[in-house]
Image (cartoon, rainbow, N blue to C red):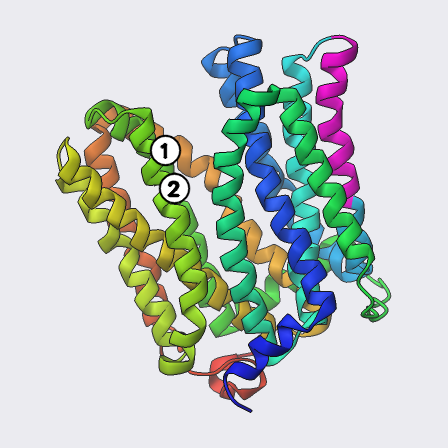
Amino acid sequence: MNAAAPAASLWRHADFRRYWCGQAVTVAGFGITTIGISVIAVVDLHASTMHVALIAIAGKLPPLLLSLHAGVLADRYRKRPIIISCDVLCAVSLTSIPLAQLIAEITLGQLYAVAFLVSALQVIGSNASISYLPILLRGEQLKEGNSKLGATNSLADLAGNNLGGLLVTALGAARAIALDAVSYLICAFCLLRIRNPEPAPRTAGTSQWTEIREGLDYTLKAPLVRSIVLSNATTSFALAASSALWSLYLLRELGWSPAVLGIVMGVGGVGGFLGAVLWRPLERRWGAGPVMLTALALNPAAQIPLLIVGPGATGQIAIGAGMLVQTCAAVAHGGLQRSVRQELCPDHLQGRAQATGAWLAFGLRPLAALLAGAFGTLVGLRPTLGAITCLLCAPFVILWCSPVRVLHTAGARAPDAVRGAA
């Protein structure tokens, strides 16, 4: 089979197209709500800095609290109904904001609740969605599907953030959020039209905590999977710490305007698209392990301009180029490692394996942001960002000392020494 065949077949894969469309619509819609809730809190309700921080915390807690349980849920029940139910409930939660504005008034308590509920439903729904993809696609098609999803989601995220500002300005924040509610209903409709039969889930015969432990055991005992997940967790921790200080450093220390900051962040979206498009041909040419290692090596290198440039256009171009490279590398690595883990994982553990990886990667992000703020206050922003850049070297070292270094194939074709124990 030639290399183009899997891609061509996906264009004719009606069920994947429905899944793909639904995912892209919700990613674009999420950017609208992120901006809309911020505008309601800051402009309409005159929220304090602490209130705004509490809204952010409410949205970051669910991955820590619910990811492992979401994995058990995805393995115990059919995944597609879980995704559809979460989409519908997200739409209902978001609709409460424009309804409150119409009937009475929006309160900060409501914003806390909506931020938490939507994030919690996304944790459950996204875990089921990621572990559902191997049911639709296998082998090379699975890699191609992850590549297409990554590229589309990068563009949708970029479009959603840009469109969100326009819609909030034109319609008002609450009405703009109502459009995001519609995006979840569109995703649910797309998934309802999937015709591929989903295998019957296994029968739950043990406690939920026992099943969570099975997912943890698989993830932490298989050498290849363990190294990938630990490197992901370290990368996520470092990038969360960096993102907590980025805006403050660029706006205050380097004197950037909000417009320039927005343009540079938009460049990151372009980098994500390029990474999603490039990792498949690079993996076919060089192999999965070398591509993942190269992507991780580029992460700290791409952050160096942030540490050495000063104010002015030259520095802005250098940091923008670094942002382009870093997001390109991050998305390329993310799509490839997800495909490798999906192919290696037994079907009955897909949900818990994905949930364990998400829990380790995203659960510590609030702590990373807190530590970054504390160290930034104590020693300054630039030294703290320098320490974070050094921390970004750790994921490369973890993979270099693991079986990933010799990984050129995945799934059933990977050598037994690379696959490890399941």
> Taking 76 as reference, is 263 above or below it?
above
Tell me the amino acid under the disc marked 1. Gly
Q: Quadrant of the N terminus?
A: bottom right
Using the numbered discs, state the Cα–Cα distance from disc 1 to disc 2 in whole angstroms: 6 Å
Q: Residue at x 51, y 80 (%)?
A: 410
Residue 70 percent across, percent down from the top left: 70, 50
Name the residue carrying label 2: 266
Secondary structure category for the residue under label 1: helix
Q: Quadrant of the C terminus?
A: bottom right
> Taking 374 as reference, is 219 above or below it?
below
Q: Residues within 10 Å of mark 1 (few under 14, many from 20)?
A: some
Q: Residue at x 79, y 11 (%)?
A: 103
> Taking 200 as reference, is 244 above or below it?
above
Mark 1 and 2 residues: CB-CB less than 8 Å, in contact?
yes
Residue 254 in which image quadrant:
top left
Secondary structure category for the residue under label 2: helix
Q: Which residues are magenta?
A: 86-104
Q: Nearer the viewer, residue 377 or 412?
A: 412
Q: Is residue 23 visible?
A: yes
Left or right, residue 387 beside residue 95: left
Residue 403 percent across, percent down from the top left: 41, 77
90 part of magenta stretch: yes
Left or right, residue 306 beside residue 136: left
Single out the residue that lies furthest toward the front.
170
81 part of magenta stretch: no
Residue 412 percent across, percent down from the top left: 58, 85
Q: Residue at x 25, y 25 (%)?
A: 378
